[in-house]
Image (cartoon, rainbow, N blue to C red):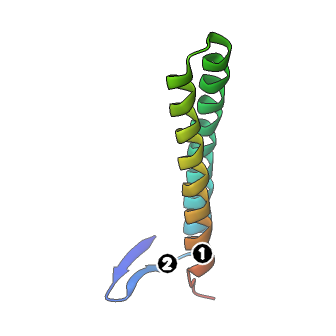
């Protein structure tokens, strides 16, 4: 379980973070898949405004994944 400390968060079990990052990537994957479907439909319909917003969602997901990976790589878990 995650525990707040004066220096941030500590981890009782390394598996907690693995589970959290796994869940986060799964949720972001669902968002990305739906954004890709929306973008494809918008392209077929010639709706540039919706296509552009779908691209923004995709870019946001990729940034969120990169941030999650950076956080994960910087975390110190007990041995």
Quadrant, the C terminus: bottom right
Q: Which residue is mark 1?
A: 14
Q: Nearer the viewer, residue 1 or 50?
A: 50
Q: Nearer the viewer, residue 40 or 26?
A: 40
* Mark sitting on residue 25: none
Query: Does the residue at mark 1 contact the one at mark 2 (Cβ under 8 Å)?
Result: yes
Residue 72 on image: x %, y %: 59, 72
Residue 34 on image: x %, y %: 60, 29
Q: Which residue is mark 2?
A: 11
Quadrant assignment, res 18: bottom right
Secondary element type, mark 2: strand
Q: CA distance from mark 1 to mark 2?
A: 6 Å
Residue 54 on image: x %, y %: 55, 32
Residue at horizontal 64 percent and vertical 17 percent from the top: 41
Residue 31 on image: x %, y %: 56, 37
**Extreme left residue here?**
6
**Extreme top residue here?**
45
Q: How many marks?
A: 2
Quadrant assignment, res 17: bottom right
Secondary element type, mark 1: helix
User: Is 60 displayed left or right of 41 in the figure?
Assistant: left
* Structural crowding at the residue carrying mark 1, measured as other residues with C-alpha within 10 Å and reported as few (<14), some (14–19) or many (≥20): some
Residue at horizontal 59 percent and vertical 23 percent from the top: 38
- Rendered view: 57 above or below 12: above
User: Is 5 displayed left or right of 12 in the figure?
Assistant: left
């Amino acid at each position: 379980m995650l525990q707040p400390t004066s220096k941030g968060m500590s981890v009782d079990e390394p598996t907690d973070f693995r589970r959290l990052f796994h869940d986060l990537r799964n949720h972001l994957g669902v968002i990305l898949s739906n954004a890709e479907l929306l973008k494809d439909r918008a392209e077929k319909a010639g709706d540039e405004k919706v296509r552009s917003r779908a691209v923004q969602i995709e870019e946001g997901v990729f940034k969120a994944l990169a941030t999650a990976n950076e956080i994960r790589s910087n975390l110190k878990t007990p041995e």
